Amino acid sequence: MKKLLALLLCMMLMIPAFAVAEDVEITLWTYPIGSWGNEETVNGIIANFNAVHPEIKVKVQYLDYASGDDQVTTAIEAKTTPDIVMEGPERLVANWGAAGKMLDISDLWADTKDDIIAASPAVEAACKNGEGIYYEYPLCMTTHCMVINYNDFEAAGALQYIDEATHTWTTDNFLKALDALNEAGFQPTAVVYCGGQGGDQGTRALVTNLYSGQFTNADHTGYTMNTEANIKALTLLQTLVNEGKLDADPGIVAGDEIALFCNSTISIGFCWNASAAVSNKASLADDVKVFPMAFPSDDGVPELQGGIWGFGLFDNGDEAKAAAAKTFVKFVCDDPSQAAASVYASGFFPTRASLGDVYAGTEKAENGDYAIFMPFLGDYYQVTPNWAAQRTEWWNLLQRVFAGGDVAAEVAVYEANANK
Amino acid sequence: MQKTARLPRQSVAMKQSRRRENIAGYLFMAPSLLFFLGFVIFPMVMCLVYSFTDYTMTSFSFAGFDNYKRMFQDAIFGKALWNTIILVLISVPVTCFFSLWAASIISKLHDRTTSFFRCVFYLPVVTGSVAVTVVWKWIFNRYYGVLNYLCMNLGLISRNMNWLGDASTALGCIITILLTTSVGQPIVLYVSALNNVDQSLVEAASVDGATNLQTFWRIKWPQIMPTTLYILVITTINSFQCFALIQLLTSGGPNHATETIMYYIYYNAFKLQSYGYGSSMGIILALIIAAFSALQFKVAKTDNG
């Protein structure tokens, strides 16, 4: 009897232990990737997850691009990193992954790798380091493009210089369009913003596309701005600014430039994408008709900058939390009932071919129009080492060039500093 | 006999009472002291230690004086130091003179009017940096900013200026904003100090035929000197640590024209994750601030006679 009682007591003591072991709380930090910065949307996704996995509680912290990196850096040094962070390869792979702070999540890729490669081989390549270790599990992608005010182009007679079917144009036609806009009095036509790193993908794409230059080498080990093509492109922009056909502004960043486009101050914007189209819809002036365009290139075939967003897991030394985090990421990205909605929330395009068009028949149907740019997705070079320092060097280079610096000399300074 | 026996007993009781008071005093001080040790002294010591290390996100090793050597070969640090000194040399005297001038006018007004102006001048201090910055960003906006609009209408400029994007005007804009956010507290302090000046001395000087300037210089100025010293030191420290305005408005540009030491420390520590190098710059900044403050104490003490 005593033995039976002792056994029962032991079993009673173990019940809470089992219960505790099963309940796990994980933390997710997310940058504002479309509606992934919106509490209501993210809570809805977590509610869907908890309907299937009630044992895993997900706490969310919302980051912004102004201070998010600082918060993560502080958390890394204080050893208080979240279990999951949502961003792109330039942070997950090239920064925190390269610093040994992230978990190898190759196992998540096992059954979806082919589907992701079918959507874009560049995505798979960007999510792993040189040794083939995956630090990101991708959810969505896009190509960053530029935008024109169709009404201004129509009034200036500049529509003849764009290919309305493919949304592309050549460098020559871009120059002719600028002339037409200037002659028609649409000044300032556009602003090359260089007040900081915000939206620098736009200015990089502008420069490298004009004469088909390359920003980095093919294996992403160094920056290669110091080439004839890139110097020619920067010289052209410097000349356009000096002639007053284009503005350069070291006092603004992309967000300010988008505002100038939306309020009809300028006719061309260099920082745009599908998500920007949705988020800025309400702030468009009456005379602004958004028409997304690829960046002008000498051969008319642009190489657009990609954005790939997904999840990375910080190595916090807790296997139970890591397992729970993987369960959450897998659910969000691959569960048949959730995956499309997760991509839809981002405003971008799925990184799995099997998901198809997630916007068809929805109120974001216009986002589908931006899929036209996906064939122009260029090399994802943002995983090149020293990326954070390079970004500062980039806008400083533009500032020096537009302040009248010698282009070749300034590019040489940039390249030397970026490759340090 | 009774008296002599009572004295030592009284002395012991007094000692015990004093000890209890001391203990109580230390206990009251303890939370603040712990906070001070944990959040001020400890980080300062750690900053000093890190300044001698090559500390990044991936490495931590002793580096001796390498960070300090690197700092003095770093052209951007030199530019940041120069900008910071210009900022301090302009903003500190202007803040002090303007605050004293404004306070001397305000303090003579009716109580309610004085309170109103104190609120007006203090408003930028209690308003968040981000909100203040957003307003100033709009004022300085190149395309639709109110400053360009005013200057154009007054015929001061012929085309829109890029106030924050032009290396020749950007630092001036930062100093202007810094002044508006710096004068609030000194004005309040000066109003209070001027109201506390011994009026009998002022009246006596007046009876003796002293001019307003003589009264101010010989009677009021010595009495408000402790306030002036406090304002000088606090304004100097705040100016040396100018960061939020730079981060929110110019990121140190254009072409490092508004780069300050504080911003450069932040950039190195948080953007490039060079914690060791950032710490060494922090130490140098602390030493510069200490030197400036000591100089101000010395000058103010001499003036005070």
Image (tube, coloured by chain):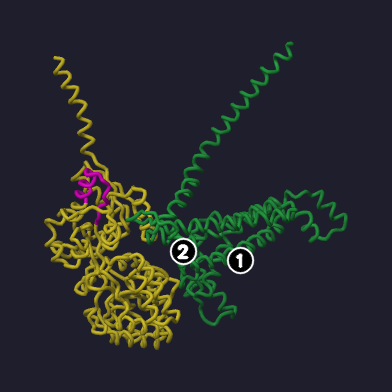
Chain colours: A yellow, B green
- Tell me, for residue B90, which label it has, or none: 1
Identify the magenta region.
A311-328
Give the residue furthest to the right: B208
Quarter holding the N terminus of chain A is top left
Residue sitting at x 57%, y 78%: B153
Q: Is residue A14 visible?
A: yes
Distance between mark 2 and mark 1 Cα atoms: 25 Å
- Tell me, for residue B71, which label it has, or none: 2
Side of A270 where B45 appears, left or right: right
Residue sitting at x 19%, y 54%: A105
Residue sitting at x 49%, y 62%: B261
Q: Are marks 2 and 1 on the same chain?
A: yes
Q: Position of residue A217 (x, y in %)?
A: 25, 73
Q: Amino acid at mark 1?
A: Ile
Choose the circle earlier in sequence order: 2 or 1: 2
- The residue lying toward the viewer, choosing from A133 and B185, is A133
SS at badge 1: helix
How many marks the image carries: the answer is 2
Q: In the figure, A149 relative to A88: above or below?
A: below
- Tell me, for residue A158, which label it has, or none: none
